[in-house]
Image (cartoon, helix red, strand yellow):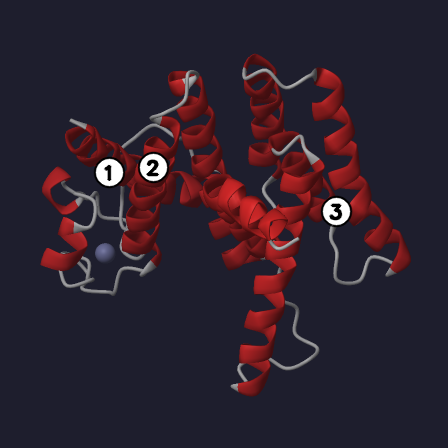
């Protein structure tokens, strides 16, 4: 039975992922959310049969039917990862007494984090119009999940303060204002120090590995900026899905 629901979660993830791809583009172009999808290259409306998540990308071999220009790998990747994360969080929530509330929070959070990831990765900008409402909604959902408002608030301040301190100390180099808001979101999302700490440590850990790889491959010089936001998103997702396991493993070391 769980298998059927898992497949169902994957299908919902694919559809949401496809919607997120379209949403992030419209957010950037300040376009309306309503209206049919269109090709960013030739502006041709995309028919429903060319808009099936993953499948259409494969059938069209990654090219627009009309202008033959290649479709960004962003589309199938976001669809795939949204589906994967929806399944993983579904399996995690399945044993919880708060199943529907937990699933609502996780799926909402994953969708927002996906948008923040793509937006910051592509345009080196944290989309505040996504971060602010997400922070507010996750705070309310966490209250319903049983966290105290004091824990949520203080954790949020620790998260924001962590980046605020760096922002002031480095005189705005490296850390942007958007990262302070992301710190607040992380703190509110994970209202315990161990979880918040884990999300930050994994973000910096993965960030430094990628930086070293880019440096060795000479893909990016010392000076070119790598946005921090996408790594904070990865840190948050790792904590969301494997947080308990990692913390248990760590505590077991002593
Ligand atoms: Zn086209």
Badge 1: how crowded within 10 Å, few (<14), some, or many (20+)?
Answer: many
Front one among 151 and 42: 151
Q: Which mark is residue 10?
A: 1
Q: Which residue lies at the image location 36% right of the left edge and 45% below the top edge? A: 21
Mark 3 close to ligand 1, CB under 8 Å: no
Residue 183, percent from left and from top: 70, 42
What secondary structure is found at the residue carrying circle 1? helix
Instruction: Answer with left or right where residue 129 lies relative to residue 174.
Output: left
Front one among 252 and 223: 252
Residue 46, percent from left and from top: 19, 44
Q: How many marks?
A: 3
What secondary structure is found at the residue carrying circle 3? helix
Image quadrant of residue 149?
Answer: top right
Eyeballing the image, is 108 above or below 220? above
Eyeballing the image, is 213 above or below 158? below
Q: Which residue ends up furthest to the front in the rendered image?
A: 254
Proximity of marks 1 and 2: CB atoms separated by less than 8 Å: yes
Q: Which residue lies at the image location 58% right of the left edge and 21% below the top edge? A: 142
The picture quadrant for ligand 1 comes to bottom left
Q: Which residue lies at the image location 65% right of the left edge and 60% below the top edge? A: 204
- Location of mark 2 (residue): 86
- Location of mark 3 (residue): 177
Q: Which residue lies at the image location 21% right of the left edge and 45% below the top edge? A: 53
């Amino acid at each position: 039975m769980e298998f059927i629901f898992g497949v169902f979660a994957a299908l919902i993830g694919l559809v949401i992922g496809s919607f997120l791809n379209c949403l992030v583009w419209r957010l950037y172009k300040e376009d309306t959310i309503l209206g049919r999808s269109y090709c960013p290259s030739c502006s041709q409306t995309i028919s429903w049969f060319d808009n099936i998540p993953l499948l259409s990308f494969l059938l069209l071999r990654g090219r627009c039917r009309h202008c033959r220009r290649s479709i960004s790998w962003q589309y199938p990747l976001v669809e795939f990862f949204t589906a994967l994360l929806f399944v993983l969080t579904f399996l995690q929530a399945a044993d919880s007494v708060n199943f529907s509330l937990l699933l609502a929070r996780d799926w909402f959070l994953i969708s927002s984090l996906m948008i923040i990831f793509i937006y910051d990765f592509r345009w080196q900008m944290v989309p505040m119009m996504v971060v602010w409402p997400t922070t507010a909604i996750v705070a309310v959902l966490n209250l319903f999940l049983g966290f105290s408002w004091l824990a949520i608030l203080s954790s949020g301040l620790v998260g924001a303060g962590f980046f605020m301190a760096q922002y002031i100390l480095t005189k705005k180099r490296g850390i942007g204002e958007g990262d302070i808001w992301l710190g607040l979101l992380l703190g509110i999302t994970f209202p315990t120090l161990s979880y918040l700490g884990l999300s930050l440590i994994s973000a910096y850990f993965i960030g430094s590995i990628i930086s070293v790889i880019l440096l060795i491959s000479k893909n990016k010089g010392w000076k070119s900026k790598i946005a921090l936001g996408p790594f904070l998103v990865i840190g948050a997702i790792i904590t969301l899905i494997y947080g308990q396991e990692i913390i248990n493993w760590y505590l077991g070391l002593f």
